[in-house]
Image (cartoon, rainbow, N blue to C red):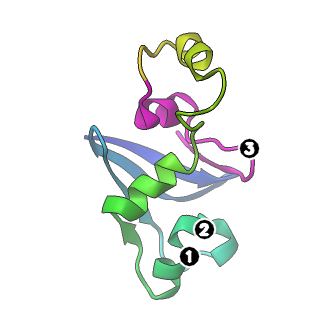
Amino acid sequence: MKDYKLYDGDICIGTFKVLGTDNVEVDLIPNLNLFNVPCDFWKGYKSGRTKFTGKEAWNFVTDRVIPSYRHGINLYLKHIGLKEYDPLEIFLHNHGRYTQDSFRIE
Protein backbone atom coordinates (compact mmCIF):
# COMPACT_ATOMS: atom_id res chain seq x y z
CA MET A 1 0.00 0.00 0.00
CA LYS A 2 1.23 3.49 -0.84
CA ASP A 3 -0.33 6.73 0.41
CA TYR A 4 -0.28 10.14 -1.24
CA LYS A 5 -1.68 13.46 -0.11
CA LEU A 6 -4.47 14.72 -2.35
CA TYR A 7 -4.51 18.45 -3.08
CA ASP A 8 -6.74 20.99 -4.72
CA GLY A 9 -4.20 23.65 -5.59
CA ASP A 10 -2.37 24.32 -2.31
CA ILE A 11 -5.14 22.91 -0.10
CA CYS A 12 -4.71 19.36 1.20
CA ILE A 13 -8.14 17.78 0.84
CA GLY A 14 -7.35 14.19 1.84
CA THR A 15 -5.38 11.11 0.88
CA PHE A 16 -5.13 8.89 -2.17
CA LYS A 17 -4.12 5.29 -1.44
CA VAL A 18 -2.94 2.61 -3.83
CA LEU A 19 -4.11 -0.71 -2.39
CA GLY A 20 -3.32 -2.88 -5.42
CA THR A 21 -3.00 -2.96 -9.20
CA ASP A 22 -6.46 -1.55 -9.90
CA ASN A 23 -7.58 -0.95 -6.33
CA VAL A 24 -7.43 2.58 -4.93
CA GLU A 25 -9.07 4.51 -2.11
CA VAL A 26 -9.73 8.21 -1.63
CA ASP A 27 -10.27 9.65 1.86
CA LEU A 28 -11.41 13.27 1.91
CA ILE A 29 -11.32 15.46 4.98
CA PRO A 30 -14.72 16.51 6.36
CA ASN A 31 -16.29 19.95 5.90
CA LEU A 32 -14.65 20.86 2.60
CA ASN A 33 -16.20 23.43 0.33
CA LEU A 34 -17.84 21.37 -2.42
CA PHE A 35 -15.72 23.22 -5.01
CA ASN A 36 -12.64 21.60 -3.40
CA VAL A 37 -14.07 18.09 -3.89
CA PRO A 38 -13.45 16.24 -7.17
CA CYS A 39 -16.74 15.99 -9.07
CA ASP A 40 -16.46 12.17 -9.07
CA PHE A 41 -17.25 12.32 -5.34
CA TRP A 42 -19.78 15.18 -5.11
CA LYS A 43 -22.87 13.03 -4.68
CA GLY A 44 -21.38 10.86 -1.94
CA TYR A 45 -19.65 13.76 -0.20
CA LYS A 46 -22.86 15.79 -0.12
CA SER A 47 -24.54 12.86 1.62
CA GLY A 48 -21.82 12.78 4.31
CA ARG A 49 -19.36 10.21 2.96
CA THR A 50 -15.64 10.94 3.02
CA LYS A 51 -14.18 7.55 1.99
CA PHE A 52 -14.48 6.34 -1.59
CA THR A 53 -13.42 2.90 -2.80
CA GLY A 54 -14.14 0.50 -5.64
CA LYS A 55 -15.57 1.82 -8.87
CA GLU A 56 -16.03 5.38 -7.54
CA ALA A 57 -12.35 5.74 -6.65
CA TRP A 58 -11.17 3.91 -9.78
CA ASN A 59 -13.25 6.24 -11.97
CA PHE A 60 -11.35 9.17 -10.44
CA VAL A 61 -8.15 7.60 -11.81
CA THR A 62 -9.45 6.65 -15.25
CA ASP A 63 -11.20 10.00 -15.78
CA ARG A 64 -7.83 11.73 -15.33
CA VAL A 65 -5.64 9.78 -17.77
CA ILE A 66 -5.26 9.69 -21.52
CA PRO A 67 -7.57 7.01 -22.96
CA SER A 68 -6.09 3.85 -24.43
CA TYR A 69 -7.60 4.56 -27.86
CA ARG A 70 -6.00 8.02 -28.23
CA HIS A 71 -4.01 8.55 -31.42
CA GLY A 72 -0.30 8.34 -30.60
CA ILE A 73 -0.82 6.51 -27.31
CA ASN A 74 2.13 4.19 -27.94
CA LEU A 75 4.49 7.15 -28.37
CA TYR A 76 3.18 8.65 -25.14
CA LEU A 77 3.63 5.36 -23.25
CA LYS A 78 7.17 5.03 -24.59
CA HIS A 79 7.92 8.63 -23.57
CA ILE A 80 6.89 7.99 -19.96
CA GLY A 81 8.60 4.58 -19.83
CA LEU A 82 5.63 2.19 -19.97
CA LYS A 83 5.53 -0.89 -22.18
CA GLU A 84 1.75 -1.20 -22.03
CA TYR A 85 -1.27 0.89 -21.14
CA ASP A 86 -1.79 1.06 -17.36
CA PRO A 87 -4.16 3.81 -16.13
CA LEU A 88 -2.83 3.74 -12.57
CA GLU A 89 0.81 4.05 -13.66
CA ILE A 90 -0.10 6.93 -15.98
CA PHE A 91 -2.05 8.61 -13.15
CA LEU A 92 0.89 8.23 -10.75
CA HIS A 93 3.41 9.41 -13.36
CA ASN A 94 1.36 12.58 -13.90
CA HIS A 95 0.81 13.04 -10.14
CA GLY A 96 -2.93 12.79 -10.74
CA ARG A 97 -2.92 16.04 -12.70
CA TYR A 98 -5.55 16.75 -15.31
CA THR A 99 -5.75 19.82 -17.53
CA GLN A 100 -9.32 20.72 -16.54
CA ASP A 101 -8.86 21.25 -12.76
CA SER A 102 -6.28 21.79 -10.02
CA PHE A 103 -6.32 18.41 -8.23
CA ARG A 104 -3.05 16.52 -7.80
CA ILE A 105 -1.27 14.02 -5.57
CA GLU A 106 2.11 14.24 -3.82
Q: Mark 1 to mark 3: distance in Å? A: 19 Å
- At 36% across and 61% down in the image, what residue appears? 55
Type of amino acid under label 1? Trp
The stretch drawn in magenta includes residue 90:
yes
Q: Quadrant of the N terminus?
A: top left
What is the number of the mark on residue 5? none
User: Looking at the image, is 9 positioned above or below residue 52?
Assistant: above
Q: Are marks 2 and 1 in contact (CB under 8 Å)?
A: yes
x then y, percent, for residue 2: 31, 39
- At 43% across and 30% down in the image, what residue appears? 89
What is the number of the mark on residue 99? 3
x then y, percent, for residue 36: 65, 67
For the residue carrying disc 2, how many other residues have a C-alpha within 10 Å: few (<14), some (14-19), or many (20+)? few
Element type at mark 3: loop
Type of amino acid under label 2? Cys
Element type at mark 1: helix
Q: Mark 2 to mark 3: distance in Å? A: 14 Å
x then y, percent, for residue 8: 65, 56
- At 47% across and 69% down in the image, what residue appears? 29
| Magenta segment | 85-106
- The residue under label 2 is 39
User: Looking at the image, is 69 positioned above or below residue 78?
Assistant: below
Using residue 38 as the reference point, say whether residue 51 is left or right of it: left
- At 72% across and 53% down in the image, what residue appears? 101
Element type at mark 2: helix
Q: 67 or 81: nearer the eye?
A: 67
x then y, percent, for residue 76: 61, 19
Q: Earlier in the sequence, mark 1 or mark 3?
A: 1
